[in-house]
Amino acid sequence: MSNRTVRVNELVQRELSDILRRRYQSEAVAMTISEVRVSPDLRDARVFVAVVGDEETGVAKLRWIRSKAGELRAELGRRIVLKYLPKFEFMLDESAIRGARILSALDRLDHPPARPASS
């Protein structure tokens, strides 16, 4: 990945987070843009969204942000100047869920369940 692509990824992530925080504060309260991966030709971007809550909440928030994709892209176009403004594909970031599962498994290894006493 080129240095320019890395900078564009960070810029798009920062600006999308700011747009969500300012314009859609009540709807986006439980959401975080965790990562953006822009293609080298800047035409497409995968936006990973982390959602606080259960799986049902995550699916609902993902559906909501996908419905706002056009508005988010238009606002981003007003904020930054790129040769091509990428089209967004929003995806649920499950790394936090996997991390919690790993931590839970590690806790179980540290503290195994008590066994009943044998007579």
Image (spheres, rainbow, N blue to C red):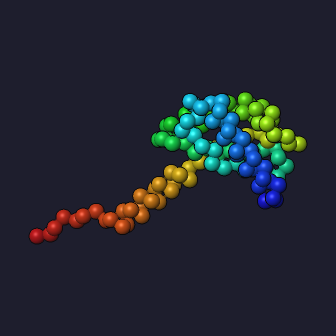
Q: Is 48 placed left or right of 117 in the picture?
A: right
- Quarter assignment of residue 71: top right
Give the residue displayed 57% in from the left and 31% down from the top. 27
Residue 77 appearing in the image = yes
Question: Is residue 23 shown left or right of residue 102?
Answer: right
Residue at 57% x, 40% y is: 31
- The residue at 42%/64% (across/down) is 106
Q: Quadrant of residue 60?
A: top right
x 48%, y 41%: residue: 53
Residue 64: x %, y % from top left = 61, 31
Q: Where is residue 41 drawn, in percent x and y? A: 85, 49
Query: Could one spot residue 92 in this view of the protein?
Result: no
Which residue is farthest right? 83
- Where does residue 21 sit, x and y in percent of width and height? 63, 36
**Which quadrant of the view contains residue 104?**
bottom left
Q: Which residue is at the front of the view, 7 or 55?
A: 7
Q: Is 31 on the left or on the right of 36, as rendered?
A: left
The quarter in which the N terminus is drawn is bottom right
Residue reaching furthest left? 119
